[in-house]
Image (cartoon, helix red, strand yellow):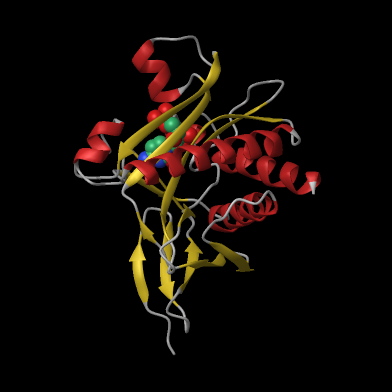
C-alpha cells in the first residue's frame, strides 16, 4: 500500500502506514519561527532532530512514561501511534527565559522554586494564546481528570529530562509538550521533543544549544543541535 501524506507541519510530515493505528513521521530539513512566518531550509536538521527525539523517547519509555513513540526506522523517519491530539501546548519551565522572562521582567535563567506549568491553546490563527485551567474546562478542551493526568505526566517528563540532560552537561531551561489519545483512547504523551521545542543551555557556559539561535540569528543553529545529539549519545 502506498503511503499517503496525512499532514505537513512546520518541521514534519506525517504519512499513513499499512497499519491504520501507526503513522510514519518524517523530519524535514526545515526551521520556522514567528508561527511559521519565517521559514528556512537547514541541512541535516531533520536527521539530527529525529535522532534526538528518538533517543529522548526511548529514555522516557525506559523510565515508565507511556508515549506515542514506537521506533526510529531510518535517519529521518520514525513510527508512532496514531493519536488524536488535545489542542494544548503544555510548557514547563525550570528557569526564567523567553516569554516568561519578558512577561515578568525577570533576570535571565532565574531558577524557580518549583517548576512553572503553563498552557497555551494551539491555534496559528490566534497565535497560541495562554489558557488557564478554567478556560480549558469551560471550552471542554480537557476535563478535570485529563488535566490532572497531563499536569502529573508533564512533571514526570520534566524530572526525567532534567536528569537526562544534566548527565550530558546541559541545563533544561524550559520545554513544550503535547498530549493526546492513542488508538485505545488512552491519554499519553505525543509530538516531538527536540531542540526545536526545548530551551537547552550548556550547564557551565550557558551557551544556547536550541532553536533560540535560529529565532535570534545568533549563529549556526546546527552547531548546538549536533552538540546536544553527541552529548546525549555519550551518556548511553
Ligand atoms: O516562548 P516561550 O518562552 O513561551 O516558550 C517556552 C518553551 O516552549 C520553549 O522551550 C519553546 O521552544 C517551546 N515552544 C514550542 N512551540 C511553541 C511555543 C513554545 O516548542 N509554539
Residue 4 position by quadrant: bottom left
Which quadrant would the N terminus be assigned to in this image?
Answer: bottom left
Q: Quadrant of ligand 1?
A: top left
Say which of 73 and 43 sits in front: 73
Visible in this render: residue 127? no
Which residue is rendered at x = 31% and y = 49% of the image? 87
Which residue in the rendered view is the most extreme toward the front? 145
Locate residue 143, reporting x and y percent.
Answer: 31, 45
Which residue is rendered at x = 25% and y = 34% of the image? 129
Q: Is residue 62 left or right of residue 36?
A: right
Locate residue 56, reporting x and y percent.
Answer: 63, 49
Locate residue 216, reporting x and y percent.
Answer: 44, 29
Which residue is rendered at x = 42% and y = 87% of the image? 2
Please give the count of numbered marks on the rendered protein: 0
Say which of 158 and 171 sits in front: 158
Locate residue 152, reporting x and y percent.
Answer: 50, 38
Which residue is rendered at x = 34% and y = 51% of the image? 86
Q: Is residue 118 above or below residue 71?
A: above
Say which of 70 and 124 sits in front: 70
Residue 3 position by quadrant: bottom left
Q: Is residue 36 left or right of residue 167?
A: left
Visible in this render: residue 32? yes
Amino acid at each position: 500500500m502506498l503511503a499517503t501524506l496525512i499532514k505537513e507541519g512546520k518541521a514534519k510530515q506525517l504519512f499513513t502506514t499499512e497499519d491504520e493505528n501507526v503513522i510514519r513521521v518524517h523530519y524535514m530539513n526545515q526551521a520556522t519561527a514567528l508561527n511559521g512566518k519565517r521559514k528556512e531550509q537547514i541541512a541535516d536538521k531533520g536527521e539530527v532532530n529525529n535522532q534526538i527525539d528518538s533517543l529522548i523517547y526511548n529514555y522516557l519509555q525506559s523510565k515508565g512514561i507511556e508515549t506515542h513513540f514506537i521506533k526510529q526506522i531510518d535517519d529521518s523517519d520514525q513510527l508512532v501511534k496514531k493519536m488524536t491530539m488535545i489542542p494544548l501546548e503544555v510548557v514547563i519551565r525550570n528557569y526564567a527565559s523567553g516569554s516568561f522572562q519578558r512577561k515578568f521582567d525577570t533576570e535571565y535563567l532565574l531558577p524557580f522554586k518549583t517548576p512553572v506549568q503553563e498552557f497555551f491553546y494551539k491555534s496559528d490563527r490566534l497565535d497560541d494564546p495562554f489558557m488557564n485551567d478554567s478556560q480549558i474546562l469551560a471550552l471542554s478542551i480537557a476535563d478535570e481528570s485529563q488535566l490532572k493526568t497531563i499536569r502529573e505526566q508533564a512533571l514526570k517528563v520534566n524530572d526525567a529530562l532534567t536528569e537526562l540532560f544534566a548527565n550530558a552537561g546541559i541545563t533544561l531551561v524550559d520545554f513544550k509538550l503535547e498530549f493526546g489519545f492513542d488508538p485505545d483512547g488512552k491519554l499519553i504523551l505525543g509530538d516531538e521533543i527536540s531542540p526545536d521545542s526545548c530551551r537547552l543551555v550548556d550547564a557551565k557556559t550557558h551557551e544556547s544549544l536550541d532553536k533560540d539561535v535560529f529565532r535570534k540569528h545568533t549563529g549556526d543553529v546546527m552547531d548546538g543541535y549536533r552538540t546536544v545529539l553527541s552529548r546525549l549519545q555519550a551518556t548511553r
